[in-house]
Amino acid sequence: MDCVSGFQFTHTKQRGAIKKEEDLLVLDIAAGEGAFSKRLFDNGFCVDSVDIDHENFKYNGTIPFVKIDLNNAQNLGEFILQNKERYDIVVSMETIEHLENPWMFLRSLKEVVKPGGYIVLSTPNIESPWSKFCFFLRDRFLMFMEGDLPYGHINPLTSFELKTIFNRIGLVHEATYPGGLYPLLWFRKRFFDSIYWCLVNILSLPFTNRLDYSWCKIYLIRR
C-alpha cells in the first residue's frame, strides 16, 4: 500500500478504496449509481458526485450531485469555472473509454484538482494478451467489440497514449496499478473457447508482466 499526500490508495478488482487520513474533498466523476461515492462518504470524506443521469444516482439528498454531459464542452467549462482547483482528489473510474475527447476530459480534471492534488483514473486494459489476440484476429480490442458499443465503449486507450497526454498537459504520472487479475484458467460457455483462452494464457505467461494480466489499469496522477 502506497501512502500519497494524506491518503492511502489500494485497488481491488475494478474498484478502489481510499482510506482517510485527513480531511479531503473528493470528486467522483461519472459516479453512476453512486456506490463508490457512498463508500467514500461512509468513511468520512466530503464527496461531490457528477454524472449525466441524475435519476440513476441513488444518494440524492445525501451526497451533492451535479448533472453533466462529459462530452459537452460547454457543460465541462461551466463546471470548471465553478470548481477551479477545488478538489484534493478526483476519481474517474471506467469513464474515459466512454468519451469522445480524452484530451479535453483530462485537461478538465486537471483544472478542478488542487495543485499537488491527485487524480485516480482507471480504464480497460487493452494491452493484455487476450486483448492483443483479439486485435490480431478481429482488428478489435477485448471489451471494445461490437457487442460493447451499447455500453458506450468507444475509445480504447493504451498506456503509452495516456502517459503522453499526462505529459503534454502537465500532469505527473506517479504509478500504475493492476485492477482485477484475469484468471489463469478461463473457462467459457463454449468448450473450444475455453481451450483457446487457456492456450493464450499459457503461451503468453512467460512474456507478460503482472500489470498486463489485469482487466483494467489504474493510474495515479499528480497535478
Image (tube, grey):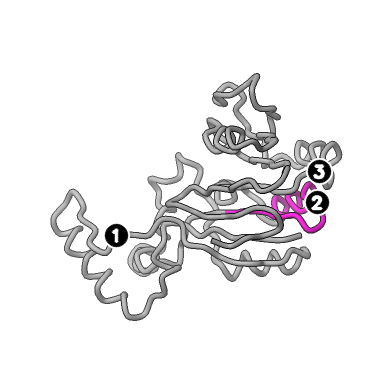
Q: For mark 2, does the 10 Å Cα neighbourhood hold few (<14), some (14 to 19), or many (20 or more) residues?
A: some
Q: Earlier in the sequence, mark 3 or mark 1?
A: 3
Question: How many marks do you count on the picture?
Answer: 3
Horizontally, is 35 left or right of 121 in the view?
left
Residue located 65% across and 19% down the image: 61
Whole-percent x and y of residue 109? 73, 50
Residue type at tag 2: Lys
Q: Do the residues labelled 3 and 2 touch (CB within 8 Å)?
A: yes
Horizontally, is 198 left or right of 155 in the view?
left
Placement of the C terminus among the 4 image quadrants: bottom right
Residue located 55% across and 36% down the image: 39
- What kind of element bears circle 3? loop
Whole-percent x and y of residue 22? 71, 46
Whole-percent x and y of residue 217? 51, 60
Membership of 141 in magenta stretch = no
Residue bearing mark 2 = 114
Instruction: Return the residue nearer the eye: 103 or 171.
Output: 171
Whole-percent x and y of residue 84? 84, 44
Which residues make up the magenta segment?
A: 104-121
Residue located 46% across and 40% down the image: 151
Residue at the left extreme of this rendering: 191
Residue located 24% across and 73% down the image: 202
Residue bearing mark 1 = 183
Residue bearing mark 3 = 86
Residue at the front extreme of this rendering: 21
- What kind of element bears circle 2? strand
Q: For mark 1, does the 10 Å Cα neighbourhood hold few (<14), some (14 to 19), or many (20 or more) residues?
A: few
Structural distance between the alpha carbons of marks 3 and 1: 40 Å
